[in-house]
Each structure stands twice: as structure tokens, then as C-alpha cells.
């Protein structure tokens, strides 16, 4: 479980979300080649910062806030 | 957006003083009378617990009533058990009788300790669930009214745990209870073709069936499914993923009874409950057929089991053939397993009783 | 009141406390509770449920914690036409101050029907019955008094544990702390369902398993010990002198014949290597026999109710794990299991079903766990073995 959540990482996630309509956490982790746990943590922070939002269609997805 | 992910309150903030002080230091306990526990700590401190039965489905005023008692005698603390009982704790033995008197005034029983029948773990039923093949709270009330004395006494060979699940989802540890009452459907789903086309995914619906009973509708113009009724064992898994396949049926729905399960590792390892009655009709408000059999089995067990022997241990010792003989419950083809691990239950020895 | 509920009225009689009385109490103050009573009476008459499949409702930011509920007789009972359930995560060990409980009551009186379950079978406080509009304000009010929602759907469900060290002398692990620590660590997993199906964690402090962890949790934590149980011979003598038949009730009932009774010396001795820590002798002679001191937990996986492939009991995965905060080893294991299950599990496939489908061998390999005999009752009998095809 090494790896810290950095602003650079969060920025990468935001950029990735710019290219898709919605994504699951594990898809984000795969796309960025990072550990899922790290992706979960970064996404959690992004949500608290109100930069992304969750949507629920049977399972949890995230997307850019307001996109 | 409001605050999220704060989690539940830290348990430390909820503990009574005597518990906080003696946390992890308890030495032994005894049941000083039915429903009253005495825990003694290494520090010499003592806490008395009065265990009180609850219907679980309660109004906020019920909770407030209990809080009044706790405020008066228990320094404003209380707890609940995994079987919905309420526990009122006090360090002062003089308060024990006062607590008992106060809860009796509220119409609540004191008991649920030792070799007794504790509160029935149960589910929602007709009060709140769409899958329910029977009601839960009404069954519990009907059974506990009859077994009331076993809650307030400790006269059984061992503790006896009962649970009720109103469908085979079994939102309780029904599959490992001494006695279990389970709501069952006995009619296949009735497919609503129009609704199904509108609200369900057909591949998901087909895949949901553990026996492969669901097929696409043979008429290509009808976007729906058909059920091979000979393959359906009424599990309602399809209904869970597709609301257009209801199984509820006033005449077909009812309950099945299971016996001999346990969770604890004491003596014999945990055991599954096994079917004793495949089907009894729903007969609200009192389900007399169910109550009669449960009472009968409890009585036969109380009479025959050895001290400390749980229902399942007793049945294992005497054999299921003896259980059916003693209880007079008929053995039918439904009792013989034909699901995934069926063969394990077939008798592969010439040893049995007559 | 002019309600006519002859069938339910029957259930007000008898000694066991009546839930019907409780609904009637709530009905005096609340129209939704009044209609709940009517719907229940109708079900008793028709012998079927009058609740429809849930709809998607919830609170901002969460994918669970609320169960959508609509009645199929909304014209007849408009006040309970939508009657959603809120699952509130209980504090570990189900201890409360009356202050906290009264606050919950006040919130629920304001925003809901006033009917509750203390508690649901997973362990949450269940607040039964409110409207869609009231969900968010109710959630915010609950947050205001320090409570949060529990899990529902394909998420980590509310974690529960027994009373443990708070008031039980047999607990070899701190169940309340484990429950609270994991709950706080995995808030995201509880509130945002993203797995094939539900996942449950339960912790019991000893093999008596008061929260049925072995039957009802995908991840089962059960307190155990590695040294020998402790016998206080003076107390043993006291039991014997009071006429307690130690030979018949304790020694003969030990499943592994691990105890010996010297009638002359009134001495009970243990062959520690034979004890399987079943708890029987401890349960029956609590003043004389206690668990060992080298405590930890046996970690088991797979327990679940019957849907879909049948019921499972959890089986041993890690015979002994030390349980010390911050529980790193356990958390890593949980994350590894979740990722693997999420990757390979089919929709609505619980962990046990997946492991059975692909084989325990593969699961152990991919978790990096070495096989040990404690994992099985006995080795295989058939000769159909796969060897690596290298
Ligand atoms: C829960 C576990 C399962 C159980 C208990 C189960 C049981 C059954 C049963 C009893 C049948 C009917 C056999 C007959 O026609 O007499 C059947 C058929 C079938 N099952 Fe399963 N099954 C399970 C899982 C699966 C899975 C996971 C798949 C595929 C991925 C599958 C695919 C099939 C197929 C293709 C048939 C044949 C259907 C047909 O011939 O029309 N089953 N299954
Ligand atoms: C939307 C309607 C439903 C309602 C209102 C409902 C309500 C509940 C409640 C109140 C509990 C106790 C929860 C707790 O203690 O936290 C519970 C537990 C449970 N539910 Fe449901 N439920 C619903 C649907 C389902 C469905 C569709 C399934 C399965 C397919 C299901 C399976 C279970 C199981 C297995 C438990 C068990 C718990 C345990 O082992 O502790 N429920 N349900
Ligand atoms: C692929 C695996 C196996 C094959 C092909 C096989 C084949 C056979 C055959 C051909 C016989 C002789 C039957 C006869 O005389 O009519 C036999 C007998 C026997 N096999 Fe197997 N066997 C297999 C696995 C096993 C296993 C795993 C066990 C025990 C765990 C076992 C136990 C026995 C016994 C006890 C007999 C003697 C039965 C008797 O004499 O009545 N076999 N086996
Ligand atoms: C592919 C593997 C196997 C084959 C082809 C095979 C074949 C046979 C055959 C031909 C016999 C002689 C039967 C006779 O003369 O009456 C036999 C007997 C037996 N086999 Fe196997 N066998 C296999 C695997 C096994 C395994 C793995 C076991 C045990 C784990 C086993 C246990 C036995 C036993 C106990 C007997 C009976 C001996 C007796 O009763 O005298 N077999 N097997
Ligand atoms: S057991 Fe079945 S009917 Fe009862 S509450 Fe659970 S899912 Fe609903
Ligand atoms: S009730 Fe169960 S067995 Fe019957 S069709 Fe539905 S999923 Fe299949
Ligand atoms: S599981 Fe064991 S430690 Fe926990 S409360 Fe029950 S007896 Fe005590
Ligand atoms: S705990 Fe169980 S196995 Fe161990 S000595 Fe006591 S009765 Fe025997």
C-alpha cells in the first residue's frame, strides 16, 4: 500500500475523467497504472474537494463535477 | 453537500463508567437469576446486567421509555444484544430489583439468559419487504407468546435459538439455528411480459436463475422470458433482479421449518439447520400450525436431550430417524436434498435405527 | 381512532411485548405509521406483501444506506405510499448513552414514521419509513448528532462485533476496537457500492461466536488463543464440593478428550495439545476455567445465507493472526480479497461462491497464503489432481 496521494496524481485523474463520460474506480486505477487502493483514496479526496461527483447506476461511478 | 463519511460515534463515548474502567479486565460471571448477569472484574468491581426482551419493531416512544429507566438506574447508559434484547447495567445490586420492576411496568419480560429460548432473530416480512413469503413480526409474537416461560426460565437442556426469515434470502442466521422458520413460495414466478420488456434486462434475468429455468420467450416478437416450471424451485432470485416476475401467491406461500443448527463452536462444530417440515400454510394472525409444531419439538427436545446438549447435538446422537419418530413429524420426499451438495446427505452406511 | 384492524388486534394479546401496540403508539402521532398499520392489516387479510420492489433513492454522495420502498396500494394508504428505510451505523458493541438515543428518536420523529428496528439483523439501527423529500434532511440531522449511514447494496455492510472485552471475560481480542477501526477505515467501501455483491465482516471475541460471524460474514474474525486455557484448581474444588458433576458434565463432554479428572484429589488437568478451544468447559465453569492469555484471532472466510448457491459456513483461512491496532495485516488481506473478488466475481456472486467456482487452491495462490492442514477437515479422497503444466 505504498504511494501517497499527490496533487499531480489527482490532476491525472481529472484529466482521465475528461476523456470519458464516467468511470469506475478500478477503471481509473487501470488506466493510470496505479494501485486500486491509491486510486480509491485520491478519488475520495477529489470528491471531498467537490471536483468530482459520484453517480450510482447499479454500481458506483465517478465523473467530473457538472460534466 | 453535507458532511459525509463521519462513521458511527466512537464506542468509547457510549460506555458506562464501570465498563470503561474494567474494559478487558473481567474475570468471571454468573447468572444470579434468570435474566440477571453478574460480571466480576479483576479490580473487584461488579456490574449487574438485567436482560430485557423487546419486540424489535418499536416506536421511538418505546426507546424513550427504556431511556427513562436507564437514566434513573443506570447512569444514562444501556446496550442492545445481537438478538435485540435490551441490557440495563448497574454497579449497585440495590438497583437490580428497581430496574426489573420498572421494565415489568412497561410490559417487558426479563430473561434470555442461560438454558432458555432467547429473543427470536427475525426479518421484516410484510411490514417492509417486497420478497416476503410470510410475515416476521407476527410469527415471532405468536411463537413467543407460547414459549414465553422459556424466555423467563432456564429449564431447557441447553440454550435454544430460534429465528425467522420471511423468504429464503434469510436475513438472519436462520440457516444455523436450533429452530428456524422460513417463508417459502411454492409457485413459480408469474411473468408480466409487458412490464418485463420495460423494466428488466433479459440476459441478466436469465442468468439470475440458479437452475437455468428461465429462457427467452420462444416468440421473437415478445421481448420477455418463459419459465420452465419443472426446473423452478421458487428461490425468487429472478424476482430480485427483475420485478416483473413476482412469486407471491396467497395460497402458495407459507413457511418451512428447520431444526438442529448452531453457530457456537462449543463441543460440536457449527451445524446447518435441516428441514423438518417442508411447508405449512400462512395462517395469520396466529399461524397455529407453526406454533403447534414448534411447541411440540421444544417439548420433545426438553424431555429427551441430555444436559448441555443443543438441539442439533441431540438429534445427531439419536439420529434423524429417531427425531421424526419421537416428534411424529412425517418424513416426505421434500426432505431429501436434490440441490448442489445433496449426495453428502445420503446415508452411506448400514448403521441406522428402526 | 376509527381504524378497524381485527387481525392485528389479535397480536396485542398474550404476554410477549406486542409490535402492534408499538405501531399503534406511533400511529397516534404520525400518519405514515397509521397507514403502515393499515397496510399490515391488509397483508394479513390478503396473505401477501403489499410492498413493491425498491426504487433508487438516496442521499448525496452515497450509493447506499437507504432502501427505497413503495407500497402497491398508494391510493388506499397515501401517507405510506413511499416508505423508505434508513440504515444507521450503530456504535461498536451496541452501547449507547440515553442522550444519543433520545437524539435519534427526536430526529426520526421529525423526519420519519417514528417506527424503528433496534436493530436490524446486520446490526444497523433501522429507521423504517420516510418520504423521498425527507431523506436528505434526515441524513443531515443524523450527521449533526454524530451518526452516519450503514451499508446496503453491493457494498461493505455495517461491521458488527460481540460485546467482547467491554463486558465479557472470554474475549481474546478487542472486538469493539476492531469493529470501529475497520468501520472508520472503510467508510468509502461502506457507502459506495462497487463490488459484485454484498460483503460482511463480523468479529466475535471467542469461539462461542455471539454474533454468528461464522454463519453470516464473508470475513469472519473469531478470538482464539495459542497457549493453554487456565484452570484455577481452588475454584474447581468449589464446583465439585457444590455437587457439580465435573466428570460427567465437563470431562465426558470435551470433544477431544483433552481433560482428566482426579476424583480423589479433586483436580482437573488439561492436555493442552489436545484442546481445540471449543469453550465448553469454560462456559460451564466460568469461575474456574478461562481462555489462555496469548490471544489473537482465527480468520475465516465465506459464510453466507442461502441465496444463490446455498448456505455456507466460513472456513479457516488464517489459523492465527495477532490482533493489534492498526490491524495492518488484516486490512491488507481484506483489500487483496476485495480486489480479487471484484476482478473475478460475477454479478451477485459472493466470495464463497467464487472461491468454490475457481477452487480454494487458486485463491490461496493469488492471496499468497500457504496451505496448512488447519484449513480442511481432511484431505481429498479423489485422485483428480491438477499439477502445474510446465
Ligand atoms: C448456482 C449454481 C448452479 C446450479 C445449482 C445449477 C443447476 C442447474 C440445473 C439443476 C440445471 C438443469 C439441468 C436440467 O436441464 O435438468 C442447470 C442447467 C444449466 N445450467 Fe446450471 N446451475 C448453476 C450454475 C450455472 C452456471 C454458473 C452456468 C453457466 C455459466 C450454468 C449453465 C447452465 C446451462 C447452460 C444449463 C442448461 C440449460 C438448458 O439445457 O436449457 N449453470 N443448471
Ligand atoms: C428492498 C427491499 C429490502 C429491504 C427493505 C430489506 C431489508 C433488510 C433489512 C432491514 C435487513 C437487516 C439489515 C441490517 O441489519 O443492517 C436486511 C438484511 C438482509 N437482506 Fe434485505 N432487504 C431488502 C431486499 C433484500 C434483497 C433483494 C436481498 C437479497 C437478494 C436481501 C438480502 C438480505 C440478507 C441476506 C440480509 C442479511 C443479513 C445478515 O446476514 O445479517 N434483502 N434486509
Ligand atoms: C480414477 C480413479 C479410479 C479408478 C479408475 C478406479 C478404478 C477401480 C476399479 C476398476 C476397481 C475394480 C472394480 C471391480 O472390481 O469391479 C476399483 C475398485 C476399488 N476402488 Fe477404485 N478407482 C479409482 C479411484 C479410487 C479411489 C479414489 C478410491 C478410494 C478412495 C478407490 C477405492 C476402491 C476400492 C475400495 C475398490 C474395491 C471395491 C471392492 O472391491 O468392492 N478407488 N477401482
Ligand atoms: C487412475 C487411477 C486408478 C486406476 C486405473 C485404478 C485401478 C484399479 C484396479 C484395476 C483395481 C483392481 C481391482 C480388482 O482387481 O478387483 C483397483 C483396486 C483398488 N484401487 Fe485403484 N485405481 C486407481 C486409483 C486408485 C487410487 C487413487 C486409490 C486410492 C486412493 C485406489 C485404491 C484402490 C483400492 C483400495 C483398490 C482395491 C484393492 C482391493 O480391494 O484389493 N485406486 N484399482
Ligand atoms: S428475509 Fe427476505 S423477505 Fe425477509 S426481509 Fe429479508 S429479503 Fe425481505
Ligand atoms: S424462482 Fe428461482 S428457480 Fe424459479 S425461475 Fe426464478 S430464479 Fe429460477
Ligand atoms: S463471542 Fe465470546 S467473547 Fe464475545 S460476547 Fe460471546 S462469549 Fe463473550
Ligand atoms: S475448551 Fe473444549 S476442547 Fe478445550 S478442554 Fe475445554 S471442553 Fe475440551
Image (cartoon, helix red, strand yellow):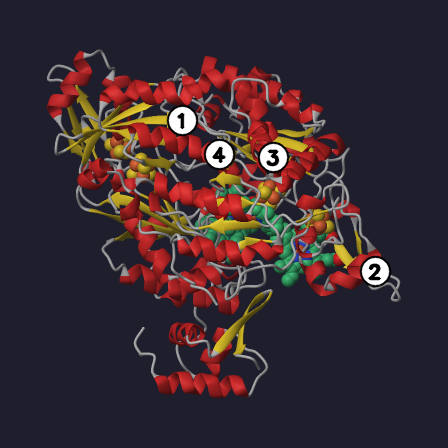
Q: Are marks 4 and 1 in contact (CB under 8 Å)?
A: no
Q: Which residue is mark 1?
A: B52
- Determine the residue positioned at 32% across, 32% down: B71
Label 3 resides on the chain identified as C
Residue B208: in sight, yes or no?
Answer: yes
> Viewer-nearest of labels 4 and 2?
4
**Based on the displayed image, in which of its 4 quarters is residue C97 positioned?**
top left
Q: Which residue is mark 4?
A: B61
Neighbourhood count class around disc 2 (C-alpha, 10 Å): few under 14, some 14–19, many 20 upward: some
Alpha carbon distance from label 4 to label 1: 17 Å
Q: Are marks 1 and 3 in contact (CB under 8 Å)?
A: no
Name above or below for residue B11 compared with residue B135. below
Neighbourhood count class around disc 4 (C-alpha, 10 Å): few under 14, some 14–19, many 20 upward: some
> Residues at marks 4 and 2, common chain?
yes
Name above or below for residue B254 compared with residue B153. below
| Disc 2 Cβ-to-ligand 6 distance below 8 Å | no
Alpha carbon distance from label 2 to label 1: 55 Å
Residue B32: in sight, yes or no?
Answer: no
- Determine the residue positioned at 52% across, 57% down: C137
Q: Position of residue C22 (x, y in %)?
A: 55, 31
Q: Which mark is residue C348?
A: none
Quadrant in the picture for the C terminus of chain A? bottom right
Q: Position of residue C98 (x, y in %)?
A: 36, 38
| Disc 1 Cβ-to-ligand 7 distance below 8 Å | no
Callout 1: helix, strand or loop?
strand
Q: Are marks 2 and 3 in contact (CB under 8 Å)?
A: no
> Viewer-nearest of labels 1 and 3?
3
Amino acid at each position: 500500500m505504498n504511494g501517497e496521494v499527490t496533487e499531480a496524481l489527482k490532476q491525472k485523474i481529472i484529466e482521465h475523467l475528461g476523456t470519458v463520460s464516467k468511470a469506475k474506480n478500478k477503471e481509473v486505477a487501470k488506466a493510470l497504472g496505479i494501485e486500486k487502493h491509491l486510486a480509491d483514496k485520491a478519488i475520495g479526496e477529489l470528491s471531498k474537494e467537490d471536483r468530482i461527483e459520484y453517480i450510482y447506476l447499479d454500481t458506483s461511478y465517478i465523473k467530473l463535477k457538472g460534466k | 453537500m453535507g458532511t459525509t463519511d463521519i462513521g458511527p460515534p466512537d464506542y468509547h463515548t457510549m460506555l458506562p463508567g464501570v465498563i470503561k474502567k474494567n474494559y478487558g479486565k473481567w474475570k468471571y460471571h454468573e447468572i444470579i437469576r434468570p435474566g440477571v448477569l453478574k460480571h466480576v472484574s479483576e479490580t473487584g468491581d461488579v456490574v449487574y446486567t438485567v436482560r430485557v426482551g423487546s419486540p424489535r419493531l418499536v416506536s421511538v416512544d418505546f426507546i424513550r421509555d427504556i431511556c427513562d429507566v436507564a437514566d434513573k438506574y443506570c447512569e444514562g447508559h444501556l446496550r442492545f444484544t445481537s438478538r435485540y434484547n435490551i441490557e440495563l447495567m448497574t454497579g449497585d445490586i440495590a438497583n437490580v430489583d428497581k430496574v426489573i420492576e420498572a421494565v415489568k411496568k412497561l410490559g417487558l419480560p426479563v430473561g434470555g439468559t442461560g438454558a432458555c429460548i432467547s429473543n427470536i432473530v427475525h426479518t421484516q416480512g410484510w411490514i417492509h419487504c417486497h420478497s416476503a413469503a410470510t410475515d416476521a413480526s407476527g410469527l415471532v409474537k405468536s411463537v413467543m407468546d407460547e414459549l414465553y416461560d422459556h424466555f423467563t426460565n432456564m429449564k431447557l437442556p441447553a440454550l435454544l435459538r430460534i429465528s425467522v426469515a420471511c423468504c429464503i434470502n434469510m436475513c438472519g442466521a436462520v440457516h444455523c439455528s436450533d429452530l428456524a422458520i422460513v417463508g417459502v413460495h411454492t409457485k413459480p414466478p408469474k411473468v408480466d411480459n409487458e412490464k418485463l420488456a420495460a423494466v428488466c434486462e433479459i440476459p441478466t434475468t436469465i442468468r439470475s436463475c440458479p437452475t437455468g429455468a428461465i429462457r427467452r420467450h420462444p416468440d421473437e416478437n415478445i421481448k420477455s422470458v418463459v419459465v420452465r416450471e419443472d426446473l423452478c424451485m421458487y428461490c425468487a432470485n429472478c424476482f430480485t433482479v427483475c420485478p416483473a416476475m413476482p412469486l407471491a401467491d396467497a395460497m402458495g406461500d407459507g413457511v418451512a421449518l428447520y431444526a438442529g443448527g448452531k453457530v457456537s463452536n462449543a463441543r460440536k462444530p457449527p451445524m446447518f439447520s435441516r428441514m423438518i417440515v417442508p411447508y405449512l400454510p400462512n395462517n395469520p394472525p396466529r399461524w397455529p400450525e407453526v406454533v403447534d409444531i414448534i411447541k411440540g419439538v421444544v417439548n420433545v427436545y426438553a424431555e429427551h436431550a441430555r444436559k448441555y446438549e443443543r438441539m442439533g447435538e441431540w438429534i445427531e446422537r439419536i439420529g434423524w430417524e429417531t427425531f421424526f419418530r419421537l416428534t411424529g413429524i412425517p418424513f416426505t420426499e421434500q426432505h431429501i436434498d436434490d440441490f448442489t451438495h445433496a449426495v453428502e446427505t445420503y446415508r452411506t452406511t448400514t448403521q441406522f435405527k428402526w | 381512532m376509527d381504524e378497524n384492524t381485527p387481525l392485528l388486534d389479535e397480536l396485542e394479546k398474550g404476554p410477549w411485548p406486542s409490535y402492534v401496540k408499538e405501531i399503534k403508539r406511533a400511529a397516534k402521532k404520525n400518519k405514515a405509521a397509521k397507514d403502515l398499520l393499515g397496510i399490515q392489516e391488509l397483508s394479513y387479510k390478503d396473505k401477501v406483501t403489499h410492498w413493491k420492489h425498491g426504487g433508487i433513492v438516496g442521499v448525496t454522495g452515497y450509493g447506499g444506506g437507504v432502501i427505497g420502498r413503495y407500497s402497491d396500494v398508494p391510493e388506499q394508504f397515501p401517507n405510506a405510499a413511499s416508505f423508505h428505510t434508513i440504515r444507521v451505523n450503530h456504535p461498536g458493541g451496541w452501547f449507547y448513552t440515553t442522550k444519543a438515543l433520545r437524539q435519534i428518536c427526536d430526529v426520526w420523529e421529525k423526519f420519519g414514521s417514528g417506527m424503528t428496528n433496534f436493530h436490524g439483523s446486520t446490526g444497523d439501527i433501522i429507521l423504517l419509513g420516510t418520504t423521498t423529500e425527507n431523506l436528505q434532511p434526515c441524513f443531515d440531522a443524523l450527521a449533526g448528532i454524530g451518526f452516519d449511514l450503514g451499508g446496503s447494496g453491493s457494498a461493505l455492510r455495517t461491521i458488527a462485533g460481540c460485546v467482547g472485552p467491554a463486558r465479557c471475560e472470554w474475549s481474546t481480542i478487542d472486538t469493539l476496537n476492531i469493529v470501529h477501526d475497520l468501520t472508520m477505515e472503510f467508510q468509502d467501501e461502506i457507502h459506495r457500492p462497487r463490488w459484485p455483491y454484498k460483503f460482511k465482516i463480523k468479529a466475535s471475541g471467542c469461539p462461542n461466536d455471539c454474533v454468528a460471524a461464522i454463519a453470516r460474514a464473508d470475513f469472519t474474525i473469531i478470538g482464539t488463543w495459542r497457549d493453554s486455557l487456565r484452570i484455577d484448581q481452588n475454584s474447581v474444588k468449589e464446583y465439585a464440593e457444590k455437587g457439580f458433576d465435573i466428570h460427567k458434565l465437563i470431562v465426558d463432554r470435551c470433544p477431544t478428550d483433552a481433560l482428566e479428572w482426579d476424583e480423589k484429589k479433586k483436580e482437573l488437568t488439561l492436555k493442552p495439545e489436545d484442546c481445540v478451544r471449543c469453550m465448553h468447559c469454560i462456559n460451564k465453569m466460568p469461575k474456574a476455567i478461562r481462555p489462555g492469555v496469548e490471544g489473537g484471532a482465527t480468520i475465516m472466510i465465506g459464510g453466507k445465507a442461502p441465496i444463490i448457491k446455498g448456505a455456507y459456513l466460513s472456513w479457516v483461512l488464517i489459523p492465527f493472526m495477532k490482533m493489534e491496532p492498526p490491524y495492518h495485516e488484516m486490512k491488507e488481506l481484506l483489500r487483496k480479497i476485495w480486489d480479487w473478488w471484484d476482478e473475478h466475481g460475477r454479478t451477485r456472486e459472493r466470495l464463497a461462491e467464487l472461491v468454490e467456482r475457481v477452487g480454494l487452491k487458486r485463491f490461496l495462490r493469488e492471496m499468497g497464503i500457504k496451505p496448512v492442514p488447519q484449513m480442511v477437515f481432511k484431505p481429498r479422497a479423489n485422485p483428480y489432481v491438477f499439477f502445474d503444466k510446465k
